[in-house]
Image (cartoon, rainbow, N blue to C red):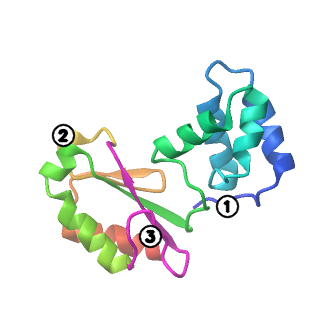
Amino acid sequence: MQKYEKWTSERAIEIIAQHQDQKGATLPILHALQEVFGCVPLEAEPLIAEALNITRAEVHGCVTFYHDYRREPPGRRVLKICLAESCQAAGVRSLEKRAKEKLGVEMGGTTADARVTLEPVYCLGLCHSSPAAMLDKDVYAGLDEERLDELLKEAQA
């Protein structure tokens, strides 16, 4: 479980400055902002664009193209369910439906008590033992309904 800092433009500018000289700095900056704030707020886009001398549209395109970036901080725990082809072939769609029903949220949503955010992920590199999921930074493979229920219980604890 990760605690995030409250958004401030001053802190964002500091983070951007730490990465702006890297080659292909946009993604490292976005990752760093999300690591610190739990999300990439819309207010960050013009700051990044100005620092990198690129358009705001280019920054916005990166943020919205990659599923990993959020606009709002997540719940206390993040449960990501792999929806890639291998996991789909192994029946992850029924597990996805079960997770949504048990948590009462759609993909990308956070439970009303802010305990769990449910997100899709498109490959965890565990295709040989699909379906797979990730709770915070721990990965789980070979999921079935029983193991998913255990994960959901752990996430909600």
* In this picture, residue 98 sits left or right of residue 76: left
Pinpoint residue 10: horizontal percent, then vertical percent. 87, 47
Per the rendered image, the range of residues in magenta is 104-123
Q: Residue at x 63, y 55 (%)?
A: 38
Q: Residue at x 47, y 42 (%)?
A: 66
Cα distance in 3D space between marks 3 and 1: 15 Å
Label at residue 3: 1
Q: Quadrant of residue 27?
A: top right
Residue hosting label 2: 128
Residue identified by numbered label 3: 155
Reading the chain from its start, which is encountered first: label 2 or label 3? Answer: 2
Q: Amino acid at mark 2?
A: His
Residue shown at 64% from the left, 47% from the top: 35
- Check if residue 17 falls in the magenta segment: no
Left or right, residue 55 beside residue 15:
left
Q: Earlier in the sequence, mark 2 or mark 1?
A: 1
Please, what secondary structure does the residue beneath circle 3 have?
Answer: helix
